[in-house]
Image (cartoon, rainbow, N blue to C red):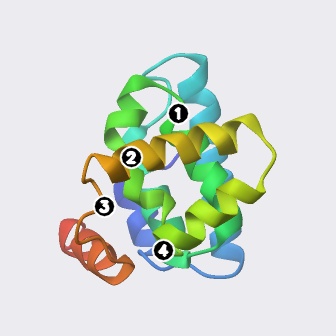
Amino acid sequence: MAMDEDEGLLRYGLHPAGANLDEVRGLLTAQTRLEKRAQGDGDTELMKLCCVQLFNAAVLEDVLLIWQAKSASMDAGFSIDIQLLCGSGLARTKAYLSSRRLPEAEAALQRLLRCEAAGDFEDFSVAGHSAWYAAYYAP
């Protein structure tokens, strides 16, 4: 299923649910795999949109999927904001990552902590970030 950012937005909106959420996860996984293979093979704009959609769904289990996408390449790393890991809030995300005994969870947690210390989460709120992306993607 070849899809770009515009088609993904049209098809799923910014707040997909149910089966559409599973399709977004599948799309993100496929694009992440392509991007990991070679930078530029994946569509990082589509990856970012998928991460925004998952951020809005606020399912903690999606945090590592978003992290894998962000970590796929340098382009993906710049395209996908660290705040998109925190759809359930910064504190809940840090607690979730701390509870996972996986190297990628530890890497994501360390990056979050560094970004938090650098001020990247000053004035962060889930609602505010969601509203910012709603304006960003508005037609």
For the residues labelled 3 and 1, the Cα–Cα distance comes to: 19 Å
The circle on residue 89 is 4
Query: Judging from the image, what secondary structure is the residue with disc 4 in?
Result: loop
Relative to 66, does residue 53 appear above or below in the rendering?
A: below
Quick one: SS at disc 2? loop
Q: Quadrant of residue 133?
A: bottom left
Check whether the beta carbons of the residues at disc 4 and disc 1 lie within 8 A of each other.
no
Which residue is label 1 attached to? 71
Q: As drawn, is 45 to the left or to the right of 42?
A: left
Badge 2 local density, few (<14 within 10 Å), some, or many (20+)? Answer: many
Quadrant assignment for the C terminus: bottom left
- Which residue extends farthest top? 38
View extreme (right): residue: 101
Q: Is residue 21 above or below residue 40?
A: below
Q: Which mark is residue 121?
A: 3
Type of amino acid at the residue the image marks with label 1: Ser
Whether pointer 4 and pointer 2 mark residues with C-beta atoms closer than 8 Å, the reply is: no
Residue at mark 2 to residue at mark 3: CA–CA distance:
15 Å
Q: Is residue 23 shown to the viewer in this render?
A: no
Q: Is residue 123 toward the left or the right of residue 4 in the image?
A: left
Position in image of residue 68 (x %, y %): 60, 40
Q: Which residue is mark 2?
A: 80
Q: Looking at the picture, how far across and down is residue 87, in whole percent? A: 49, 71
